[in-house]
Image: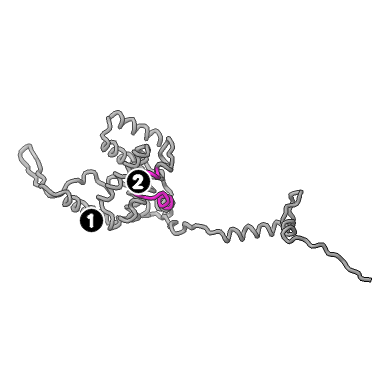
Amino acid sequence: MTMGSFIPVQDNKRSSAKKRAVPKNNKFSANQFELFNIGISETIKRRKAESYAHVLLPSGYLEANSDFHQVYDPFFVDDPDLKMSKHRTVITLPGFMGSILQYSRPVDIKKELNEHFRTTHPNVDSSLTLSQIRKIKTKLLEVGQAANLELASVATAYVYFEKLALKGVVSKFNRRLVAAACLLLASKVTDTKGTEMRPLLEHLDNILETSSKDVLAQEFNTYAALEFSLFVSPNEVLPHLERILAHLDMDKEDVYSTKVFYMGVN
């Protein structure tokens, strides 16, 4: 007589699935919770994370004499009166004073103004010139008009950009990207009617030639370089806003209403 026994064969997949299945009463044992948490921890460890530690630098808030928070002068970086060359002849007569400007080629005037800017702004990166700053600001205004932004947003972007230039963050090579990030941040803070990001990014790409991917990647770096301080004083913004309105040759009533609206919002 032959005796034998039969052992049922279990499907490995079904068996492991049953082990991982949640009990019907949805209650885990202590051991199951521990294994579950370990699994989540291992998954998080394997996931690649992006660090911004390299942009988080000491800001000097606790220092008594910190150079990080000097008073910002909206006329210091881009002096509106700095337009002509210094070569002139002054004529003084009884009850009369006049000056004669010698003819200079635009290229020579541009070179002279840039040299003057370099000597009076030693903290600004040596590769960045006054003519580049002015051209970037003109481009930002063009983007602002194309994207239908508030003019105060453009003026605020000017403040951000000049503050970063004084800190040595802006150079000839990254000026377009930093300026685009400044306008993106300013639109989020000051544009009361709301701004759609996609059209704004498209205009930045077309006018400033900065891709949306690069601008979004630069946004947090610019935010950190501004020491996470995006709300600026009206005294810092209004001079830029007034120059923008004068450049656009707006009517006095429109200028007044724009300034009153900005002061009311802020």
The C terminus lies in which quarter of the figure? top left
The spot of residue 153 in percent (x, y) is 37, 40
Q: Residue furthest right?
A: 1
Residue at point 72% right, 57% down?
A: 17
Q: Which residues are magenta?
A: 200-217
Disc 1: which residue: 119
Disc 2: which residue: 206
Find numbered disc 2 in the image and state the secondary structure of the residue it sits on.
Answer: helix
Q: In the rendered picture of this protein, how many numbered marks are placed on residues?
A: 2
Within 10 Å of disc 2 (Cα), the crowding (few <14, some 14-19, many 20+) is few
Is residue 81 at least partly visible in the picture?
yes
Q: Main secondary structure of the magenta part?
A: helix
Amino acid on which the number 2 mark rests in the picture: Asn
Residue at point 44% right, 59% down?
A: 54
Within 10 Å of disc 1 (Cα), the crowding (few <14, some 14-19, many 20+) is few
The N terminus lies in which quarter of the figure? bottom right
Is residue 223 at least partly visible in the picture?
no
Residue 236 against residue 21 in the figure, above or below: above
Left or right: 238 as drawn, with respect to 40: left
Q: Are marks 1 and 2 in contact (CB under 8 Å)?
A: no
Q: Residue furthest left?
A: 94
The foreground one among 181 and 166 is: 181
Find numbered disc 1 in the image and state the secondary structure of the residue it sits on.
Answer: helix
Amino acid on which the number 1 mark rests in the picture: Thr
Tell which tag, 1 or 2, sits nearer the viewer.
Answer: 2
The spot of residue 211 in percent (x, y) is 39, 50
Distance, label 1 to label 2, CA atoms, is: 34 Å
The disc, 1 or 2, on the residue closer to the chain's N-terminal end is 1
The foreground one among 207 and 56 is: 207
Left or right: 79 as drawn, with respect to 19: left
The foreground one among 251 and 1 is: 1
Residue at point 37% right, 42% down?
A: 233
